Image (tube, rainbow, N blue to C red):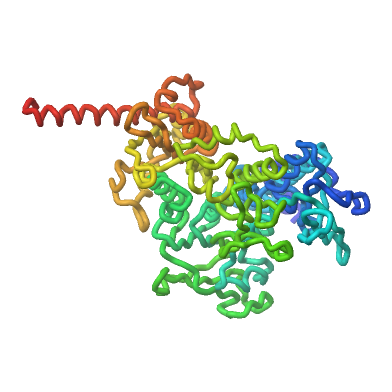
Amino acid sequence: KRGMVLALGAILSCSMLLLPRVPRAAPPTSRRAPPPSMLKAKYDLVVVGGGPVGVTAALRGAEFGYSTILIDATPPRQFQFTGPTGLYSKALRDSALRLDVPVLRSMGIVDAAIWAQVNEFVQQILRKSGDNNMKALCLNNVPHLRGMGRLRPSDDARCSVEVAYRRGESITLRSDNVLLASGSRAVRLAALEQWYTTPLGGHVRCCDSDSIKQIDFLPRKVVVVGGGIIAIEFARIFAQLAAEVTMVVRAADLPKSLARVGIDNQIGYLLQADLRAAGITLLFESEIASAQGDCGKATPSPRARGATGRLRLEVVQTGTAEVREELEADLVLTATGRKAVTDGLGLDALGIEIRPNGDLAVSTSLMTSAEGVYAAGDVIGAPQLASTGIEQAESAIDAMLGRRDVGAAEDASRLLDMPVAAADCSPAALLSNAARYPIGIWTMPELAFVGLTAAAARAPPHNLDVVEGVGRYSESIRGHVHTVGSEREGEYLAPFMRGPGSAAAGAAGEQLTGPALKLVVERAAPHRIVGVHAFGEDACELIHFGTTLVQGGKDLSDITAVCFAAVTYHELFKLAARDAIGTLQCDAWRRIYTRLVQMGEG
């Protein structure tokens, strides 16, 4: 027995040595806010919201020399200023890529230990982000107060903000300028409402895109409800963590589900095929009708005898409510949209207008219907990206404090010949111009795009005559180096392009069957680039060169004239440009042959 115990101890010790080590994180920077008695009674700028939008706005105001204070409602015992909601999924993705869960399980390492390692990676990233933001605020002398901010009328200022910072205690701050950056919260499904908070088998089994950050176990069977960016990212992450993943999507396929954000059809089908290649089951035109736990009992009872620790979901056909199948899941994640956080802000006190969909109504300068009160980020609606929210924060501060750079803004507004108001970062302005910002989807590999798709370019109001050029990863040197001998070598997605929700072969030109970068180019000289779409490794980095091309009105010659560093993915731009040039030349020769035939000389 003694020998068996020693042998088992040696095996476990070796197993733990093989787990990737997480460097011990440095002690977090002190996050203690100054006591309210030390705060000023009046500030030039009060920012409500401690996310990336609020932090950016506070730093911008301080840079201009204005006295600024940041109000943050992060709950006690949680790290402040840890970045956007999406940072958690990116951190979880990177953590999943560091570990090989099947190998660790084969060595006898239990799921609890594996998840502890994954979670430590994630928390280290979040702490680092919070520390960096805190240091920036301290360096710029921006005080912060943890509490709930509520707008109130004021006699000697445009408005005041009452901050409840302790139970039963509050302080009132006066200011002529307030920026609301309260963000958004996840929309929950009524069919699953009781399961978002009720433990089953010792764990809460249903999460939304906010509460997923509180997950405390490694799931083996996951159901993701939704077909948007967040749903897709988490589905791919849990597949990487060796979970059996099923996606329940209302749309007929992923390109249709992502159509509102401007995804290219062919690139969208590549993404869909890659999810299938990762072992993810896709249920289209489906939705969740009900859920049960604990051996079919409708009322949650985690202590009931025979509890399985899993939810049973009834999936029905969208539109007909016909039952399709039943699913079991250790974890259900719903990512079916987000709604602006406006409750508790005291908007009625100043008569601030709220749109029918719940978003704050703002002008082109991002001012609400109350003088001196501005808003930015998710609270004013789509596109609800951290990147655009940060741009809105800077634009709003520039507008309210009189530091708008009109010249630069007008230069930036000439995107796709669609002029917008100077420094106009309102939702309407951003959504009306596909060149204003790139979008990245952090799958494995990544997907990113900016500008118009070919279909959008040909449709009103653009009415452009365009061609496409494609650069395939399998034809690039770096793409070959990174995949040779692996399951991702060559056009590896060809077998996964079939199945429910797949595009018909040749439906939109030649079907792509592997990672690729696509250029959308005007047919007429000088062949201006109006869109860039990519699916593959480093796509979220490559898209920034694509953004420069689209926003700068660059043409194919601007790509072919560049000397790219050898063995880099940027070679894809040159491959795609040459493909587009080949298409243009073929079309030119075709017109010549047609004319000769018409003249009787063919």
Q: Looking at the picture, tell me which residue is in the foreground, 88 or 369.
A: 369
Which residue: 40% across, 36% down?
518
Q: Quadrant of residue 129?
A: top right
Query: Considering only vertical position in the picture, is 148 above or below 312?
Result: above
Query: Considering only vertical position in the picture, is 579 above or below 436?
Result: above
Which residue: 61% across, 35% down?
406
Which residue: 52% across, 74% down?
290
Q: Is residue 231 left or right of residue 180?
A: left
Q: Is residue 10 visible?
A: no
Q: Looking at the picture, tell me which residue is in the foreground, 206 or 469.
A: 469
Q: Is residue 498 left or right of residue 246?
A: left
Please identify the residue farthest to the left as the structure is shown. 600
Q: Quadrant of residue 455?
A: top left
For the C terminus, the quadrant is top left
For the N terminus, the quadrant is bottom right
Q: Position of residue 522 (x, y in %)?
A: 36, 34
Please identify the residue farthest to the right as the structure is shown. 37
